[in-house]
Amino acid sequence: MNAQPQRPDDRGGRAQPMLIAKGLQRYFPIRGGILNRKVAQVKAVDGVSFSVLKGETLGVVGESGCGKSTLARLLMHLLTRDAGELIFDGDPVGVPNGLPLREMRRNMQMVFQDSYSSLNPRMPAEESIAYAPRVHGMARAQAKDTAWDLLRRVGLQPEHFAGRYPHELSGGQKQRVNIARALALGPRMLILDEAVSALDKSVEAQVLNLLCQLKRDFDLTYMFISHDLHVVQYIADRVLVMYLGQVVELGPVEEIYRAPRHPYTAALLACRLTVDPADRIDDPPLVGDPPNPVNPPSGCRFRPRCPHAEAVCEAKTPMLNEPVLNEPVSGPWNPHAADHLVACHMAHPGSGHSKAMH
Amino acid sequence: MSGLSAITDTATADTVVAAVASARLRGYWGNVWQRLRYDYVTLGFLALIILIVLSAVFAPLLAPFDPNRASMAHRLKPLFFRTNYLGTDEQGRDMLSRLLYGGRTSLLMGILPVFAATIIGGLFGVVAGYAGGRLGMLIMRTMDVFFAFPSVLLAVAISGSLGGGMVNQLVTLTVVLTPPLCRVAETATSQIRGMDFVDAARASGASTMSIVFNHILVNTVSPTLVYASTLVSASILLASGLSFLGLGVSPPTPDWGLMLSTLRQAIYVQPVVCAMPGVAILVTSIAFNLFSDGLRQAMDVKA
């Protein structure tokens, strides 16, 4: 990606993607009745594949409830996946002879959204940060030094903030402590689950700048989950658009923002608000709610809300890895996936959709 | 001059930093104490509790008479009858001495079962709350069975089947007090378990044991302790009730509940003297209740 020196813990080399996800799937059972039998299941994440390249920021966008957070928790192994494969820097995770879970957790950490519940109210900032290194066997004094150093790196003077409890910190300060805690194990990749969404705009900007700074300092890779399209445009290199537990579009941020190819992405981008009153949006780009993920529509899941829906959309599920313009198959986990992938029949030549390219 | 003021400024700044640092180092219990320190009402009740406990502990030194020495000549005497400052009971025994000695039994009945129930109920509650699923369900539904009975009825039933005596009474009270404490611990635990910092700890690779001790227990202890402190007075009252019904300690052991029970026949003869054990129960209960109220406020941690 860039000419930075390779980190000593970089095993696969620059060209190996940091993380490859293949066909991740997680259904939540809904139990009911007298016998507490499984009566239905919520398809929270349904066949999600993508890769995160080293040193990039992958933005993940989508409406609330589309499975963004479930995806993050699957990647962190806070939830077990029903199916699918994870490859971290060339090593499969959680399989025999693969990368042990504990090792992967040293390498990949997560920053949580809710700054209220993401810090232990009974632990001072310093202890919250030093906890993970202590768990991994670091001596108390050394862990404290690490915590103080990280506090400095996230812009909090340790002399003032190390001993503070969460209720003595503002929202922005709490989020800085959260970021410091995620960095305490020296990870190579951070999953930021709505990490700045709860902050007010000026603090959000400060924390975003901090994240950019830290990314350079520590040579990090980010997966940035957000519902704020402006923030994603600012921070991300590539964007992954989710709808109802599936990836509908994946590609470079400029390309997707300039020319979205999935009608859902187009509608999502049309929802962005501007500060220019002349650009007021009067007509909603999209009406209705997403369908119930318990019983998603057949074929394309966006079909019921799509202005371009045709018979083929009901009959056939559009795949993300459909070859574009007769090129050889390039899966979404393809390491060289600089290409723009879309799960829409209109983008797939010969799909049978009247607006499909030929 | 300006140089001097600069020096004093740095000095003040240093002292401020030092003061802030020392304030930070106090930790949670230090902060609780800081908040309690200026709550004079709670401190007053704490002093009262200490006074009651001390008077029970040092009853042999404080009591003017042997609590079991009867005198047929001086039965049911009023307050300030000679040196029987609180009068005498239906067998002519000194009320003050019996109240001091009775406090030993009653406080024991108030504190020991609550202590035992906090440990047992807390343990089950934390396990049920953290494990959830079938195990949590099994524990909590079992507790619900005990909950289904009114506490007095349950106590009477258990006491009745075990028989009287102090040990059996302690066991009874522990069994009765365990379910509510278990439920409080379970609620607190399952609430904490769902919070992101527990997930963050799991994501860092911490073991279940480490998470429970470092993240769950510290947040479960204070609501459970506060609730337990409110149960002390309930336990004293329940124990008194059992003794009153003859299911607790047996005569002539002095016990506030038992004394109230035996003296009630003389309520028209010496109403004030007969009410004395009740007053002791009342004062002790109120002291524990209001102290736990203040404790709850002081232990309330903002997130």
Image: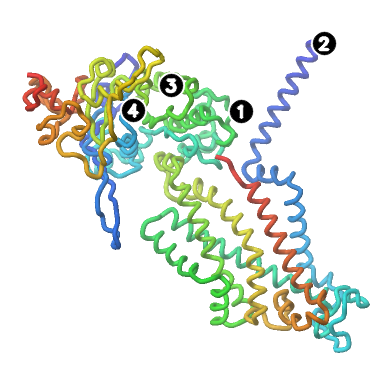
What is the x, y in percent for residue B194?
43, 46
Observer-side mark, 2 or 3, equals 3
* Same chain assignment for discs 4 and 3: yes
Given the current orientation, which residue lies at the most extreme right position? B82
Residue drawn at the location 58% of the way across and 65% of the way down: B116
Element assignment for label 3: helix
Can see residue A91? no
Chain of the residue where label 2 is placed in the rendered structure: B
Gap between marks 2 and 1, in whole Å? 30 Å
Element assignment for label 4: strand
Residue position marked by numbered label 1 in the rendering: A160
Marks 2 and 3 close (CB-CB < 8 Å): no
What is the x, y in percent for residue B251?
71, 83
* Same chain assignment for discs 2 and 3: no
Q: Nearer the viewer, residue A68 or A294?
A: A294
Left or right, residue B88 beside residue B262: right
Gap between marks 1 and 4, in whole Å? 31 Å
Corner quadrant of residue A335: top left
Residue drawn at the location 62% of the way across and 62% of the way down: B231
What is the x, y in percent for residue A267?
27, 24
Q: How many residues crowd mark 4 within 10 Å: few (<14), some (14–19), many (20+)? A: many
Chain of the residue where label 3 is placed in the rendered structure: A
Residue position marked by numbered label 2 in the rendering: B1
Can see residue B258? yes
Q: How many residues crowd mark 2 within 10 Å: few (<14), some (14–19), many (20+)? A: few
Gap between marks 4 and 3, in whole Å? 13 Å
Residue position marked by numbered label 4 in the rendering: A223
